Image: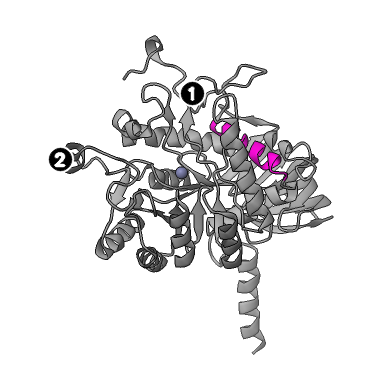
Amino acid sequence: MKARQVIPLVVLIALASGFSVGQQAAPKTPITAIKAGRLIDPETGTVAAQQVILIEGEKITKVGANLPIPAGATVIDLSQLTVLPGLVDSHTHMALTYKEQPENYYYYLTYITDSTAFRAIQAASNGVQMLNSGFTVVRDVGNNALYADAALRQAIEMGWLPGPTVIPSGPMIGSTGGQYWPTPEMYKEHNIMYPEYIDANSPDEIVRAVRENMLFGARTIKLCVDCKPWGYSVEDIRLAIREAEKGGCKVEAHCQTIEGVQRSIDAGVYIIAHNYPTPEQHKQMAEKGIFLAGTDTPFMPYRGSEAAFNRTVASLKDAWEKKVPLTFSTDMDYWNERMKDPKTGEWLSRGDLTMNFLETWKAAGIPPADVLRAMTINGYKASDIYGQRGPIKPGYFADIIAVSANPLDGVDALRDVRFVMKNGMVFKKDGVMMPEKFFNPGPVRMPNGRWTR
Ligand SMILES: [Zn+2]
């Protein structure tokens, strides 16, 4: 009996130490220890001083003060910095950049001038720029040509290039016409809606469109609820929600009318995009726990108007006061030649431009802790990845950033991202991302000063 007991014990020890009996040592999972001067928990809005985060491979294993650092661990000293989980843009378009030239900001034309392949490559560049600014997750919701968003997700997961975790929607699903008003010949003879939108009118077509998007890589479903007066009914939206559920997807409703918002609330969508809900509807969204991706555009030298900005600020403030679950969301999908840093004259990256949306949150007087929650916890929840990715807790993927100052004292601290780790891999250190200066969100090098192939 005694001898028989010894063998399993040996096997157990061997397994626990990473060896299997009679075989070579398996390659050891690298261990990283991050020393964090300050560690923010955005869930509670609190800071803990002098914390250690242990990471094994891609995942966090331990977090705490005075944790012993295992021998052989790579130590990353962020003791002078504030460490927090990676940020989320809950509504963006990585493969869409409509420009002043040549399409006069008319994005219907972008997909005539820019192929899916071309846009996918730009999306890859935008992904690097977003990660550099600390965004480790993006919800990429439509207007991405023929599944450039799903391809981007896959390429990043395959390790072909660095970038955030992408939650792609595939083409937006809408009733006849999507967001376009095409001519009969372009619509009927050239199928111009596709791939920017999938026309789905009847229940059968809605089911087919949702299934197709999930088949081709969508992780969320985006509906154009009221882009046209005929739009979707409560029953149509419920059908899409039920069908999406089968593939593990939640539904985001693009709404641009109060009626569309109401139908989406009544149907029980997961997220409502854009800032059309009324104060009364904010109340209903809060009660039902429907996320708002308000896409709260700031008034900048390169974009917006003061009047529109004031309306946006008032709407965001009201949503916050009514306790709607808010996400940080941008709809950042345009470019012009004024997108430069006024001080240095350098081009602003996709990440910088995204971060500029903080101006709206500041103007709405939303406390930094709540802005941070929108940019992290609520973003993970809206992305439907909460529980696997996001918080700096054992068992989660190590998506970690660090900034110099404390963003709980002022969210502009987020503009100075010094360190970025995604899936346990360091992408930016001491404020330096490798080819940082190379990437750009627009066509800044136009041969002969004009747009040409
Ligand atoms: Zn959008």
* Residue 212 locus on image (x, y percent): 30, 57
Would you call the spot at circle 1 few (<14 residues within 10 Å), some (14-19), or many (20 or more)? some
- Residue drawn at x 55%, y 25% is 302
The reply, left or right, for residue 189 in relation to residue 403 is left
| Callouts 1 and 2 close, C-beta under 8 Å | no
- Residue drawn at x 27%, y 44% is 194
- Residue drawn at x 38%, y 30% is 106
Q: Is residue 389 visible?
A: no
The one nearer the camera, 22 or 168, is 168
Q: Give the residue pinned by disc 1.
A: 336
* Residue 187 locus on image (x, y percent): 21, 41
Q: Is residue 361 magenta?
A: yes
Q: Work out which quarter of the rendered image holds the C terminus and state it.
A: top left
Count of labels shown? 2
* Ligand 1 within 8 Å, label 2 CB: no
The reply, left or right, for residue 341 in relation to residue 263 is right
Q: Quadrant of residue 201?
A: bottom left
The reply, left or right, for residue 401 in relation to residue 199 is right
Q: Amino acid at mark 1?
A: Asn
Q: Which residues are magenta?
A: 350-365
Q: Give the residue pinned by disc 2.
A: 189
* Residue 429 locus on image (x, y percent): 67, 35
